[in-house]
Amino acid sequence: MRGGYEPQTLFADRAKERKTQTAMTDARSGIAHGAAIAQYTLLEALKNRVLFIALIFTFIGVFAASFVGDVAVIEHKRVEIAVLASSYRFCAVFVMMILVASTIVREFNDKCLELYLSLPISRAMYFAGKLTGFYIAGFALAAVFSAALLLYAPAAAVGAWFASLSCELILMATVTFFCVLTFNQQITSSLTAALFFYLLCRVTDSIVLISKGEILLHTTGSAVIGFVVETLSFVLPSLERFTRSDWLMYSDSAAAFGALPLIVLQTVVYCALVGAAALIDFSRKNI
């Protein structure tokens, strides 16, 4: 009886081996296609002159900061750094949001997405490939703006500022991708929602501090508003702690590197949550 079962066992083992080899081949093929999508995303960013736009903003920021520093009454150098760092941060985030929204909307409208999905690639791999390309473009944007700041601040503080700005761009790229999918590829609505989310995350901590001020009347309405604001500050990422200008103004690299672990943790957590929600929405769409 043992001899009768041996061929069946042999055939079953060979079938399992073939399935394993097929799965590994499909995985390698999917990763290769995802890498190609990420590379194409970077090429499209270069084609859209993203780095050229970043360089233009860089030179404009230098001239604007020099003018503001000249008219400042005291601490000319620190005023220049504050204006330069804050303007660079907002320009980088705005360029990243426009890049993500315009790229995804164009691929939907030009039916490029249907071409991608006709290949042996899953939607999850396409999603990961696009985000990887956007993340690398974010690193490039942060590098361009950080390089200009080396003329004004120490390299250690600029390095921490670069890492924090990269995390901020990664987070906003994920959020913008989610907004584009949620608002059915409407670029105006998507950019408005992403910008509103960014500004809300930037000012929530300040609103919490203002709501706790002693000069305010402690009424039922103010208590409700305070509760809502505190809830938002607990739920939303604290972008006010990201890419702080005072790291550069006071050359406080120790505080900057001390804040980076929490910044990286917030970026990973919120990118995972928002990315999962975007992937679920993307998987349910009829394309």
Image (tube, helix red, strand yellow):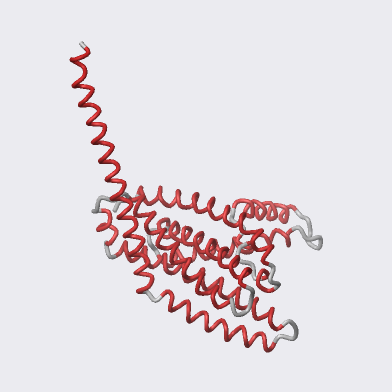
* 284 lies left or right of 191: left
Which quadrant of the view contains residue 17? top left
Report the residue that reaches farthest toward the right: 214
Q: Residue at the spot x=34%, y=57% of the render?
A: 35
Q: Nearer the viewer, residue 258 or 51?
A: 258
Q: Residue at the spot x=55%, y=78% of the render?
A: 148
Task: Please state the horizontal and vertical placement of residue 285, each as a whole percent of the image.
Answer: 34, 51
Task: Please state the horizontal and vertical placement of residue 164, each as a whole percent of the image.
Answer: 57, 63
Task: Please state the horizontal and vertical placement of residue 226, each as a whole percent of the image.
Answer: 70, 55
Report the residue that reaches farthest toward the front: 3
* 203 lies left or right of 282: right
Q: Nearer the viewer, residue 232 or 131?
A: 131
Task: Please state the horizontal and vertical placement of residue 25, each as a whole percent of the image.
Answer: 27, 45
Q: How many marks?
A: 0
Which quadrant of the view contains residue 103? bottom left
Q: Residue at the spot x=21%, y=19% of the render?
A: 6
Report the residue that reaches farthest toward the top: 1
Q: In which quadrant of the rendered image does the N terminus lie?
A: top left
Q: Nearer the viewer, residue 258 or 120?
A: 258
